[in-house]
Image: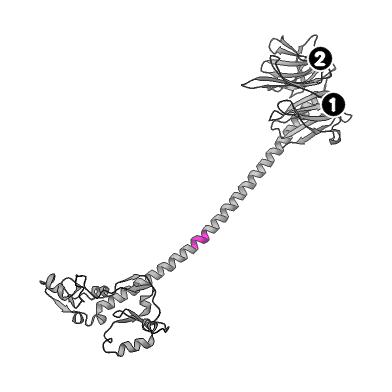
């Protein structure tokens, strides 16, 4: 049986290539006319005038003419000749093999085929066949479904883009809220730390100026232990006084006979005492016995800062009067560096081991590098220093406190970067 669909598909093989919109015969005559039809036999695009001529010429009247929009974007490649070596024109249609053949094919490969018809006989009535109508309807339905799918895809893309934009805004807002909340927590934490620092410093300041009522002994220097205690020096009575920081009451005392203690620091189970005769004594906490004395100068050792780590044990100190030295030594007395200033009275170390030294006479605050070189004068009398006597950093090194011993006995607080 003749398969009209396969026959038509065979006739109209095309691939996507060139969009033909100009009339080919007119172009050959150097005229420009828009094509409205396409002849599949001549393989030419035809304008209105050429289409009329095409239909009245007897030789061309049997040609197949289709709307040019069918070929939009496609170049029709219709094979009219057989692929055999002689390239003979197709003349017949083989029903058994459902293909076009030439005379040579009949003799060579289609000799036993039962029904071979001329092309014009085989194709008679194919345009009006029910099968072609069904195919046309199926193609129309397929095109409609494809169009709907494309429109639905475009709508989905638009909807996805809108949802994406909304979600990105929600994420940005959520991140902003998190950052704001973290900033609030950070600010609150710093505020609470400042309050705690002030309370601690107020307690330390109270210790440094308090009087032990029972004995009326003035406290010269104090050192905060890791427990709830501080140890203070009482140079007039040659004593080390332990003080409870919770109740602000005096605890045990360690006598240092023959030594006037002016500064104190605690390292593990040892108390380091800076004396008025240029010496530093190492006293055992448990036995209260002095087992080592370093002779480092001739004046008052007014401030001590021990730095102990896995590599070394260092001791920073300043000598008020005498040699007026600011020095760093090892615990065995080996000197690392020394620097002469004008009546240094107090020391502090920052997180980078820069040394901060108060000169009580000139009322200056010096900063020394970690190798003992004078780096800068940070504060002067014009900045509010008035007989500065003590300096300390808080635990985070974000604030620095300087105590003045003028008539107001104020404490200055500086923010550190």
Q: Secondary structure at mark 1?
A: loop
**From mark 2 to mark 1, how far is it between C-alphas?**
18 Å
Residue that mark 1 sits on: 360
Residue that appears at 20% across and 79% down: 119
Q: Residues within 10 Å of mark 2 (few under 14, many from 20)?
A: some
| 21 sits left or right of 238 in the view | left
Does the magenta portion include 171? no
Point out the residue furthest to the right here. 407
Quadrant occupied by the C terminus: top right
- Compare residues 231 and 378 and report the one nearer the observer: 378
Which residues are drawn in magenta? 159-163
Q: What residue is rendered at 68% in x and 12% in y?
A: 286
Magenta region, mostly helix, strand or loop? helix
Q: Quadrant of residue 362?
A: top right
Q: Is residue 350 left or right of residue 17?
A: right
Q: Position of residue 50 (x, y in %)?
A: 36, 86
Q: Give the residue at mark 2.
A: 298
Q: Is residue 379 above or below residue 89?
A: above
Q: Position of residue 374 (x, y in %)?
A: 76, 28
Image location of residue 367, percent across then percent down: 76, 30
Indicate which disc, 2 or 1, sits on the residue closer to the N terminus: 2
Q: In x, y percent, where is residue 62?
A: 26, 85
Q: In front: 370, or 402?
A: 370
- When the figure is inspected, residue 127 is found, relative to residue 96, above or below; the finding is below
């Amino acid at each position: 049986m003749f398969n009209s669909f396969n026959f038509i598909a065979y006739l109209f093989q095309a691939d996507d290539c060139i969009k033909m919109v100009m009339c080919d015969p007119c172009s050959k005559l150097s005229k420009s006319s828009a094509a409205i039809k396409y002849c599949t036999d001549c393989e030419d695009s035809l304008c209105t005038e050429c289409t009329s001529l095409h239909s009245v010429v007897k030789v061309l009247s049997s040609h197949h003419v289709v709307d040019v929009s069918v070929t939009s974007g496609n170049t029709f490649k219709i094979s009219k000749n057989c692929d055999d070596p002689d390239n003979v024109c197709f003349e017949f249609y083989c029903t058994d093999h459902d293909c076009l053949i030439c005379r040579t094919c009949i003799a060579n490969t289609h000799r036993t085929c039962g029904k071979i018809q001329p092309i014009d006989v085989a194709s008679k009535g194919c345009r009006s066949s029910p099968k072609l109508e069904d195919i046309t309807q199926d193609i129309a339905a397929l095109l409609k479904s494809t169009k709907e799918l494309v429109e639905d895809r475009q709508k989905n893309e638009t909807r996805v883009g809108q949802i994406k934009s909304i979600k990105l805004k929600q994420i940005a807002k959520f991140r902003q809220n998190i950052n704001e909340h973290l900033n609030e927590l950070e600010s609150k934490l710093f505020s609470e730390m400042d309050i705690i620092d002030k309370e601690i410093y107020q307690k330390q300041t109270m210790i440094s100026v308090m009087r032990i009522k029972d004995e009326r002994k003035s406290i010269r220097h104090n050192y905060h232990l890791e427990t709830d205690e501080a140890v203070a020096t009482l140079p007039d009575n040659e004593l080390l006084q332990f003080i409870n920081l919770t109740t602000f009451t005096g605890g045990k005392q360690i006598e240092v006979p023959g030594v006037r203690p002016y500064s104190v620091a605690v390292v593990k189970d040892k108390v380091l005492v800076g004396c008025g005769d240029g010496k530093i004594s190492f006293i055992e906490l448990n036995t209260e016995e002095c087992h080592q004395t370093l002779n480092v100068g001739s004046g008052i050792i007014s401030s001590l800062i021990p730095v102990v780590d896995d590599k070394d044990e260092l001791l920073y100190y300043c000598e008020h009067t005498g040699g007026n030295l600011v020095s760093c030594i090892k615990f065995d007395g080996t000197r690392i560096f020394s620097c002469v200033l004008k009546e240094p009275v107090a020391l502090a170390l920052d997180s980078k081991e820069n040394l901060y030294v108060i000169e009580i006479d000139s009322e200056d605050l010096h900063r020394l590098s970690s190798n003992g070189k004078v780096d800068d004068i940070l504060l002067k009398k014009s900045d509010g220093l008035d007989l500065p006597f003590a300096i300390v950093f808080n635990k985070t090194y974000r604030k620095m406190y300087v105590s003045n011993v003028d008539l107001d006995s104020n404490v200055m607080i500086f923010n550190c970067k």
